[in-house]
Image (cartoon, coloured by chain):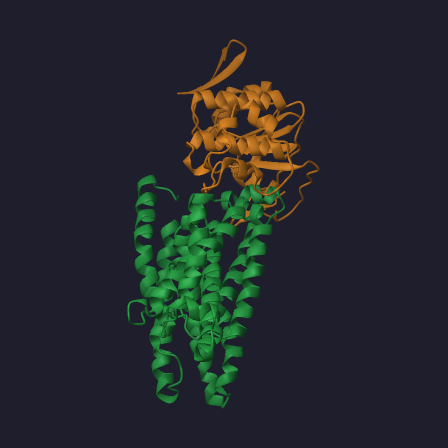
Amino acid sequence: MKVKLGKNLIINNITLSFAKGINLIIGPNGSGKTTLLRTIIGMINPLEGEIKVKENLSFAPAEFYSPNIKVRDVILAGKKKGEYEKFVKMFNANEFLDRDFSSLSSGEKRIMLIIKALAEGDLVIMDEPLSNLDIANRRKIIESILKLKEEKQFLITSHELEMINFADNVILMKKGKVVYQGNKEEISEELLSSVYGVQVKKINYDGYVFFKTY
Amino acid sequence: MLKYIFATLLPISFILGLLYGEVKLNLYQIFHPNGAYSIILYEIRLPTVISTMLIGILISLSGAVLQHLLKNPLVDPYISGTASGGAFGAVLSYFLLAFNLPFSWLIYFQPLFAFVTATLATLITVGIGRKGSIYSIVIGGIVISYIFSSLTTILLVIFQEKYPQIPPLTFWLLGEIQIIGWSDVIILSILSALFVLLTFKFSRALDLVAISDEISYTHKINPGRQRIFWLLLVSLINAYIVSISGIIGFVGIIVPHIARRIDGSMRSLSIYSPLVGATIMEFSNIISRGLFGTIIPLTAITALLSSPIILSILIKVNQKGEVL
């Protein structure tokens, strides 16, 4: 698949397939992660190649506009039928339903849009779901994804390398190309260091891996 | 609470609109019209009052739709340049008189010309503002409005020497709902019914486009196509309004703002923007048509009524650093 935006080839000759469970796309700023997501949802047409999506897609954006709309109407916007109550309960967000979406904090807004995405799709795409969130909200989001990964497929972009711990399939991108695709165990310090251009150190702690730069 | 206030004010404004004008009627004459009063009531007052409300409905809902689609609380058909563009086209159509077209035929061509230039002006403004902050559209729109208003002024100066029957500059630039016949009422009613029904039916889609283009795509809604469709519809509606009433400003900004206090979803706005818009337009037109002894151009009144609310929106936008 090739994708061109303006004069530049943003995504060059990539072939991807997504696994069941959590697919994580990582890579430096400008590596084409968001462009890839936008191509998958049909917002951008690829120059070459094709995208086959059988599942019902949904999307939790990193950037959005906050109109003065009740949270309930935000979740119902677009009129796709979905059982959202279950996901509202999962996040203890019942009290938010009748509040004005624009009056929520940025973290709360993100969670409401994640509830919407979980309710709407079988392949849930999340663009930077953890950015600008405090550790408690991050944990809530990660837990919900882990809880649902048997019944739904996830495609997540993130700058948080710790997300690798939860991924079933990791896609590492750089300058529009996929430099690695596969399981998380084989992601090495050397690979990350070369992709990001800084020294990355992998730290094992309590069964999880953490990454530090120095 | 707010909705009940406006639901009460609307019929009051309707009655007051029938009473006040160049000839003041009293309640008895309204319910038992005869002679000259019956002509004033049925041929002048009633169509004027009804079309004022319909124009209020259409401009307000246009504002609500534009604000949603462009994700900007400061736009309406006036700011987006739609009205000024339309006025230019409407005035431009007078050149047809040079080809010996009867003056009475012009009413059929005028909205058509207005539609073309209104669409052009709107698309230029939206094009300028597409990538920028919320102020890009506002500033871009003001510049586009000035360009088309200046062209309108120049054209009118040229045309009026030859055809003194053309309405004056104040009518075109500042609006006036005065001489409106039943045929206009019929067209305005059809447009209003259509517009309210469409916005109500597609309210969930409009809400989604307001929130996120990306989510819209996963719902098989193409936000670009949505914007084009609604911008064309808004241009069409406002082109027609401008050709019968000149440019009426600011109502389209403040009414959705008031209606959002009730509920900001398009489903609710499609009902309450018309309610609030009809009421505010009717009261403005009562003042415009001579409540205080003289006829005052409509936009002079709507601008004064709206400015406190618009200033408060600006301050709020500045404080939060983001819109709404």
Furthest toward the right, the residue is: A54
> Which corner quadrant of the image does residue A76 belong to?
top right
Q: Residue at x 37, y 42 (%)?
A: B322
Nearer-the-camera pick, A122 or B263 = B263
Q: Nearer the viewer, residue A213 or B260?
A: B260
- Residue B16 falls in image quadrant: bottom left
Vertical position of residue A196 compared to residue B1: above or below: above
Label the orange chain with its letter: A
Query: Quarter of the image containing the N terminus of chain A?
Result: top right
Counting labels gives 0
Q: Residue at x 50, y 84 (%)?
A: B104
Q: Quadrant of residue B165?
A: bottom left
Foreground residue, A158 or B220? B220
Residue A188 placement (x, y as % from top left)? 54, 20
Nearer-the-camera pick, A95 or B184: B184
Identify the chain drawn in green: B
Residue visible at 49% across and 49% down in the picture: B269
- Residue B297 visible, this angle: yes
x then y, percent, for residue A196: 46, 29
Residue B78 showing in the rendered view: no
Placement of B173 over or under B53, stated as above or below = below
- The residue at 54%/48% (across/down) is B206
Residue B265 percent across, percent down from the top left? 50, 44
Where does residue A151 sit, x and y in percent of width and height? Answer: 67, 25
